[in-house]
Amino acid sequence: MQKRITRLFSIILLIASALVGQALSVGIGHAHAADALEKVQIDTANGPVIFDVEIMRTETERERGLMFRAFMPEMRGMMFDFATPQTVRMWMKDTPLPLDMLFIRANGTIARITNAEPFSTRVLPSGEPVLAVLEINGGMSTRLNIKPGDLVKHNLFGPVK
């Protein structure tokens, strides 16, 4: 009986945490995000994959990122535009979603992909100068065969053809 109560409490706590996280994300300015989605195409060996993404262009937007969000639709993402190529360091503090981080060079090619753990304060470096980082749901890179060297198409990396 004690085991059942503990398990039920854990499930309730998990659901409550997700709802609070979603409420917080709306409360700190994410409500408008769905209105500002842009298409990003990744050319993989299996063909093109298209995500609808929010673009974080300001320092404040990049610092907030996906913090406190408990859910992101499957083919959605967030891209961090750093304006000029630079070595960047990312982390997952206050981010409950497992994510794949795609570090993207100025020419649009993926330099590296890192699997990021929820709430981790471990620093995830780009390893080389990049212009942007695309965050998608954890495991999507493997599932969709996205690999370093694949080309990301968005006007951030030049005219899209």
Image: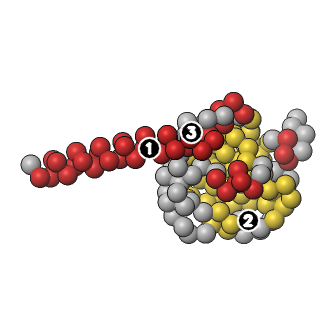
- The residue mark sitting in front, 1 or 2, is 1
Q: Residue at x 61, y 69 (%)?
A: 123
Q: How is the image coloured?
A: secondary structure
Q: Position of residue 27 (x, y in %)?
A: 56, 41
- Three-letter code for the amino acid on which mark 2 is drawn: Val
* CA distance separating discs 3 and 1: 10 Å
Mark 3 or mark 1: whose residue is earlier in sequence: 1
Q: Position of residue 152 (x, y in %)?
A: 77, 46
Please name whichever residue, 19 or 38, is drawn nearer the observer in this view of the structure: 19
Q: Residue at x 20, y 52 (%)?
A: 6
The residue at which mark 3 appears reads as 26
- Three-letter code for the amino acid on which mark 3 is drawn: Val
Q: Position of residue 114 (x, y in %)?
A: 61, 60
* CA distance separating discs 2 and 3: 27 Å
Mark 2 or mark 3: whose residue is earlier in sequence: 3
- Three-letter code for the amino acid on which mark 1 is drawn: Val
Please name whichever residue, 139 or 88, is drawn nearer the observer in this view of the structure: 88
The residue at which mark 2 appears reads as 88
Q: Residue at x 63, y 41 (%)?
A: 29
Q: Helix, strand or loop at disc 2?
A: loop
The residue at which mark 1 appears reads as 20
Q: Helix, strand or loop at disc 3?
A: helix
Contact (CB < 8 A) between labels 2 and 3? no
- The residue mark sitting in front, 2 or 3, is 3
